Amino acid sequence: MTNTELTDPDATGNGTAPDARTRLAAVVYNPIKVDLPALKASVATEESAAGWPETLWFETSKDDPGQGAARQAIEAGASVIIVAGGDGTVRAVAEVVHGTDRALVLLPSGTGNLLARNLKLALDDAAGSIRSAFTGTDRPIDVGMIDIRRADGTVDRHAYLVMAGLGLDAKMLANTDDDLKAKVGWLAYVKALVAVGQDRNDLHFRYSLDKQPAQSMRAHTIMIGNCGLLPAEIVLLPDAVVDDGHFDIVVLKPKGVLGWVQIVSKVIWENGVLSRTRLGRRFRTTNVDALNYATGTELVLRLHRQEEIELDGDEFGSAIAFKTWISPGGLTVRVPAPAA
């Protein structure tokens, strides 16, 4: 596949620049994930203390996970958009806000909270998160963009903040019981993992990284990460940084039980334990047979057959090809101000 077969990565975000003096917040919230009366009371307290006008409110729905609500917030003049919901809501809102001069504030409200974890934000301090919307500092982070080509030839564009993946993770999500996930959170993936573990079909694809000559590969899983920390403190991509201007790639190619032992040792022991100290990092290995890393700013990939794809922990149907690239500093996230 040539680098021009998918749409060109030259589009930016949406919306017009607000007046620099405007101070207006909006909340985009998932009604299933939040205690709305408590949230409104907390926002009212913080906006009043900061001297801001009354905050705007926009609710997501099954048909609109956040993009429409974010557009309404921007059109209404909001300069700061507080996202109260899970990873899917954050991703959907960021898809609209990126490329504008609006700031995004995370109010962790789901089971994963992947971006909040990678930014080392508090997951259990709702009041502090809301306060940062009115008193925090702005931090630009990278955004992953992806054009997904479907089997019928159509292409749809999306943003992702944490990871995009084919293989194990995408198949797990496709096999996860949503009702069970709502009850027990990430434990619901155990049931899905058992089912996916019986799948012996490898991915077969051709790829071009940073416009280099295309190569063919067979692998169990490929994941492209803007940042590398997963729930349960699992560090899948130890060198991924959310604002370094490129993405990190991990390819899993296990052959039998020994291959999975290599992967577990690499991810759990080396990435999760050794990488935590300067001395430990000296003992880290590079690639192993079952697990390879790479970095880049653009990846074009065509599959031998359509496969399930996921973005930031949500399934996005089946893809036959995709082009993904990094938008450096494409999103402004407002975080708590440093302690005095």
Image: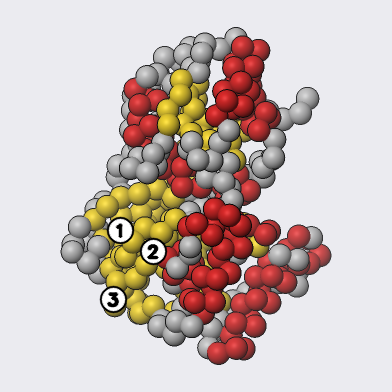
Residue at horizontal 42 percent and vertical 31 percent from the top: 59
Residue under label 3, please give it: 305
What is the number of the mark on residue 148?
1
Disc nearer the start of the sequence (1/3): 1
- Can you give x and y, in whole percent of width and height, for residue 245 in the image? 49, 49
Disc nearer the start of the sequence (1/2): 1
**Residue 36 higher or lower than 159, as above or below:** above
Residue at horizontal 20 percent and vertical 57 percent from the top: 154
**Given contact means CB atoms under 8 Å apart, are the residues at marks 1 and 2 in contact?**
yes
What is the number of the mark on residue 309?
2
Does residue 101 appear anywhere in the picture?
A: no
Secondary structure beneath dot 2 equals strand
Residue extending furthest toward the right: 279
Q: Tell which tag, 1 or 2, sits nearer the viewer.
A: 2
**Quick one: label 2, few (<14), some, or many (20+) residues within 10 Å?**
many
In the figure, is residue 7 to the left or right of 121?
left
- Can you give x and y, in whole percent of width and height, for residue 264 in the image? 65, 76
| Cα distance between the residues tagged 3 and 2 | 12 Å
Secondary structure beneath dot 1 equals strand
What is the number of the mark on residue 32?
none
Within the image, what quadrant is residue 281 found in?
A: bottom right
**Given contact means CB atoms under 8 Å apart, are the residues at marks 1 and 3 in contact?**
no
Instruction: Say what amino acid the circle numbered 3 marks.
Output: Arg
In the figure, is residue 339 to the left or right of 99?
right
In the figure, is residue 226 to the left or right of 217?
right
Instruction: Say what amino acid the circle numbered 2 marks.
Output: Ile
Instruction: Say what amino acid the circle numbered 1 marks.
Output: Ile
